[in-house]
Amino acid sequence: MYSLTVGQTYSAGKPDLNADGRPDQLVKHFGSNYGDVDVVHYLGFVQCGDGTAINVLEGQFKDVIAPVVITEPWPDLTATRGCAASGHEEDPPQRIKLSFNPESYRYEEDSKLDPASVCISSP
C-alpha cells in the first residue's frame, strides 16, 4: 500500500518506444520529500538486445502517455505536470509534449518549463 511516509515505485506501462518488438518500461515513482505533497517522477527505459536497458526519459510529471499503437520508432509522448505546492492540488495540470532527441538519445520537453511554472498562484 502507498503511504505519504514511504515512497513507491512501480511500472506505469510497457510501450515499445523504439518499435523493435521488445516491450520497454515506463516507471512511476512517488516521493514525499515535500511534506504532505507528493512529487511524481517518471523514468523511461528502452530494452536492449543484450538484456540491458537505456534510460531515455526522466522528469517530474504527473502522467506520461504513449500512443496505444506504435508503428514508428520514438513517437511523441504526452505528459502532464501538476503543481507541487500545498493548497494547489486542484490547479489544472500543464500538458507537455515530449519528443525524442536522437542526439541526446532522450525524450525532451518541446518547451522546457520549470516544474514550478505549473502553479497558477503562490501559496
Image (tube, rainbow, N blue to C red):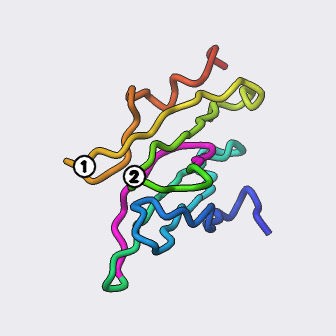
Residue 26 at x, y = what percent? 53, 61
Residue farthest along the top direction in this orientation: 121
Q: Residue furthest left?
A: 103
Type of the residue with mark 1 = Pro
Distance CA(mark 2)–CA(mark 1): 9 Å
Sort mark 1 into few (<14), some (14-19) or many (20+) by Cα contacts within 10 Å: few
Residue 82, quarter of picture: top right
Q: How many marks?
A: 2
Q: Please, which residue is most extreme toward the front here?
A: 71
Question: Which sits in the foreground, 97 or 16?
Answer: 16
Helix, strand or loop for the magenta stretch, by majority: strand
Quarter of the rendering containing residue 27: bottom right
Graded by Cα atoms within 10 Å as few (under 14), some (14 to 19) or many (20 or more), the crowding at tag 2 reads: some
Which residue range is magenta in the image?
52-65
Q: Quadrant of residue 55?
A: bottom left
| Mark 2, secondary structure of its residue | loop
Q: Residue at x 31, y 85 (%)?
A: 50
Left-right relation of 80 to 114: right
Q: Position of residue 85 (x, y in %)?
A: 64, 30
Q: Label 1: state its secondary structure.
A: loop
Q: Which mark is residue 102?
A: 1
Residue 52 is situated, as x and y percent measured from the top left of the image, at 34, 80
Answer with left or right where residue 108 lies relative to residue 105.
Answer: right
Residue 74: give its label. 2
Residue pictured at 52% horizontal, 53% vertical: 42
Residue 58 lies in the magenta stretch: yes
- In this view of the protein, which residue sits in the foreground, 1 or 55? 55
Q: Is the C terminus in the top left, top right, bottom left or bottom right quadrant?
A: top right
Residue type for callout 2: Trp
